[in-house]
Image: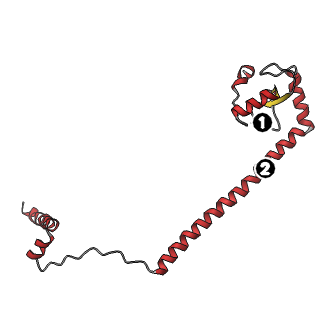
Amino acid sequence: MEALLPIIGLLWLAFIIYVDKKRFEERFPDVVIVPEAEPKPKTIMEEHREAMARFREAITKSRIEAIEETETKPRIDNYRQKYLDYLQSPEWHAVSLAIKKRDNFTCQSCGSTSNLQTHHITYKNLFNEPDEDLICVCQPCHSILHLHYGKNTGNYPLLQHIVA
């Protein structure tokens, strides 16, 4: 119990300070309570340095974003152009004709025999497609497929009964 007396005394002292600072100062005039130090105001130079650091960080970030955009955009544009060139190539025309023959020159979605096109069910093997990745559809059905399901999705429920 005697060992707890100093701790109890300190707790009591803290309580008194908390409850009534004035009473504490009257009772213990020799004890000086040091107020918490207020943060030192920043000088103009410190504020300037911080502002410049934020500015440099923002410029660096925007430069990185610009570099990333210019690096990826040409690759996408080049790939798209390569795909469009492929669709005009004799190789693609031969593949497309073979698929149309396989499907009896008939749209595999609606049964039409006019305005036929060859549709990629999946783009996983683009430029080297196996026959099962391609199907014959008419232009209206082809447009509906891409309009409704997007491009390059490989998810075309209208054709699942045919592909399965």
- Which comes before the other along the chain, label 1 or label 2? 2
Q: Nearer the viewer, residue 145 or 37?
A: 145
> Which quadrant does the N terminus fall into?
bottom left
Query: Which residue occupies 12% across, 80% down?
Result: 30
**In this picture, residue 159 sits left or right of residue 46:** right
Q: Secondary structure at mark 1?
A: loop
> Which quadrant does the C terminus fall into?
top right
Query: Which residue occupies 50% across, 73% down?
Result: 50
Q: Name above or below for residue 153 compared with residue 11.
A: above
Task: Count neighbours of disc 2 (C-alpha within 10 A) and say few if under 14, some if 14 to 19, many if 20 or more.
Answer: few
Identify the image quadrant of residue 23. bottom left
Disc 1 residue type?
Answer: Asn
**In this picture, residue 152 sits left or right of residue 39:** right
Q: Name above or below for residue 13 compared with residue 41.
A: above
Instruction: Check disc 1 and report the residue beneath it.
Output: 125
Q: Is residue 134 visible?
A: no
On the image, the x and y values in percent for residue 113 come to 86, 21
Instruction: Check disc 2 and report the residue beneath it.
Output: 77
Q: Secondary structure at mark 2?
A: helix
Disc 2 residue type?
Answer: Asp
Query: Which residue occupies 15% across, 68% down?
Result: 17
Query: Which residue occupies 71% across, 24% down?
Result: 158
Q: Residue furthest front?
A: 140
Task: Count neighbours of disc 1 (C-alpha within 10 A) and say few if under 14, some if 14 to 19, many if 20 or more.
Answer: few
Q: Is residue 84 visible?
A: yes
On the image, the x and y values in percent for residue 96 come to 87, 30
Q: Name above or below for residue 101 compared with residue 78.
A: above
**In this picture, residue 75 sits left or right of residue 10:** right
**In this picture, residue 114 sits left or right of residue 63:** right
